Image (tube, rainbow, N blue to C red):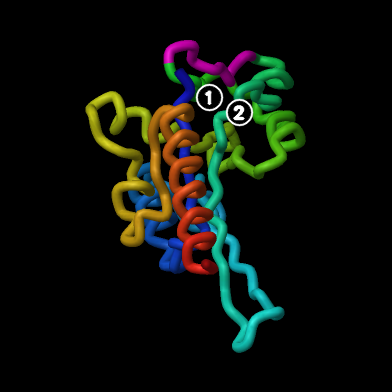
Amino acid sequence: MQLAFAFDVARCSGCMACIVACLDENDLPDTAHAFRHVNRFENPGTTPPTLSFLSLSCLHCGDAPCVTVCPTGSLQKRERDGIVTVNRDLCAGCHSCVLACPFGAPQFPEDRTMAKCDFCVQRIEAGFEPACVRVCPTRALRFGPLEELTRETARKASLSILKSLSSGL
């Protein structure tokens, strides 16, 4: 099983509650070190111009490049759920993971060892959602097994296509 986040750009209002929840849950000093980031995009092709938001964190990649390049083995991918974890005691602070990660997930707070999103593993092991998912007021963020999230997304896309086709008749 691979746990994952799902994000619906059409639902995100850009409220940044996910970032605040991440900061609070992980005791992070400021938004520069948050494990989740929200990017804002202006769509100038619409009248009036509209905004879209993209919320990203570590994607816990199937073949995580950060794990592959870590010289100390401080990054590991858990077999049971696919979570990429960090043993900060083993981290040498070399930043190899930063260079390997295309999503900017690795962060280096004040103590100079790497930290990143771990799906709020302590929360999910206690039966709760990650903090960012729990606080999302529009439910733009979801969390669960990748297979279920993929199936649900495909179902919603099919319904949307059918609705568009039937309204055009």
Q: Which residue is mark 1?
A: 84
Task: Say few, some or many: other residues with alpha carbon within 10 Å of mark 1 (under 14 / 14 to 19 / 20 or more).
Answer: many
Residue at 58% across / 32% down in the picture?
113
Q: Nearer the viewer, residue 33 or 168?
A: 168
Magenta span of residues: 73-80
Relative horizontal placement of residue 23, taking residue 31 as reference (left or right): left
Which residue is depicted at the point 53% across and 35% down? 115
* Secondary structure at numbered mark 2: loop
**Left or right: where 32 falls relative to 156:** right
Which residue is nearer to you in this view: 60 or 24?
60
Q: Which numbered tag is attached to residue 61? A: 2
Quarter occupied by the N terminus: top left
Query: Is 76 inside the magenta-drawn segment?
Result: yes
In space, the residues marked 1 and 2 are separated at their CA atoms by: 8 Å
Q: Residue furthest front?
A: 169
Judge from the rendering whether residue 60 lies leftward or rightward of residue 98; answer left or right. Answer: left
In the image, residue 68 lies at what x, y percent? 70, 18
